[in-house]
Image (cartoon, helix red, strand yellow):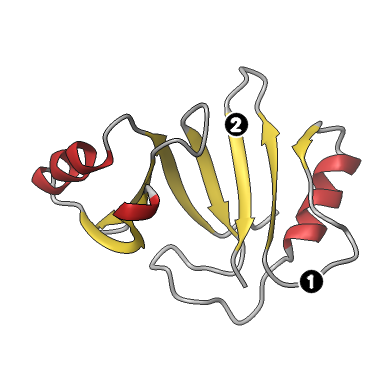
Amino acid sequence: MSLGAFSLSLTVQDIAASRAFYEVLGFDPIAGDEAQNWLILRNGECTIGLFHGMFERNMLTFNPGWAQDMSPLETFEDVRVLQERCRAAGIELMTETDPTGDGPASFVIKDPDGNPILIDQHR
């Protein structure tokens, strides 16, 4: 199963303070809108997302269709295919997407320890 680019999505209390902290560690904003309470930051090949008020817990995030450097992949497994593969393997879906749709979509699963995993396709 090819899940695409990996990042860690962090639930933060103060997005400006978190941005400043991660910038000291060498992360630069590459996407998002602080006024909308979300930012994506990168340091080399490491990507983190800062989200205020959007998620209850930190989560692993995978983006089908993107390489780790955030460039679009020519071919990739659609999020709906990945969703069906998880379902067929007996993985419980916490949220799901319409299996008949196309384009951007997402679903959430949890690992055995309750850590949420977001599979989030943007194209």
Q: Residue at x 18, y 37 (%)?
A: 17
Q: Give the camera-side residue of 83 and 98.
A: 98
Q: Is residue 116 above or below residue 68?
A: above
| Residue 106 image position (x, y, % from top left) | 68, 53
User: Which residue is at 13% across, 51% downward?
Assistant: 26
* Rendered location of residue 50, percent (x, y): 35, 44
Horizontal arrangement in the rendering, residue 11 relative to residue 86 (left or right): left
Identify the amino acid type marked 2.
Pro
Location of the C terminus by quadrant is bottom right
CA distance separating discs 1 and 2? 23 Å
Q: Secondary structure at mark 1?
A: loop
User: Disc 2 on helix, strand or loop?
Assistant: strand
Count how many numbered circles sit on residues in the image.
Answer: 2
Asked whether the beta carbons under mark 1 and mark 2 sit within 8 Å of each other, the answer is: no
Q: Does the rendering let one see residue 50?
A: yes
Point out the tag, 1 or 2, that comes first from the N-terminus. Answer: 1
**Label 1 Cα neighbours within 10 Å, binned few <14 / some 14-19 / many ≥20:** few
Residue 8 in which image quadrant: top left
Residue 60 in percent (x, y) is at 51, 39
* 58 displayed left or right of 23: right
Is residue 46 visible in the rendered structure shown here? no
Q: As drawn, which residue projects farthest toward the top? A: 113
In the picture of the structure, the residue carrying the numbered disc 1 is 102
Q: Is residue 55 above or below residue 19?
A: above
Q: Nearer the viewer, residue 109 or 19?
A: 19
Residue at x 44%, y 75% (from the top left corner):
71
Q: What residue type is disc 1 on?
A: Asp
Q: Which mark is residue 116?
A: 2
Check the image and report above or below for 90 versus 7.
above
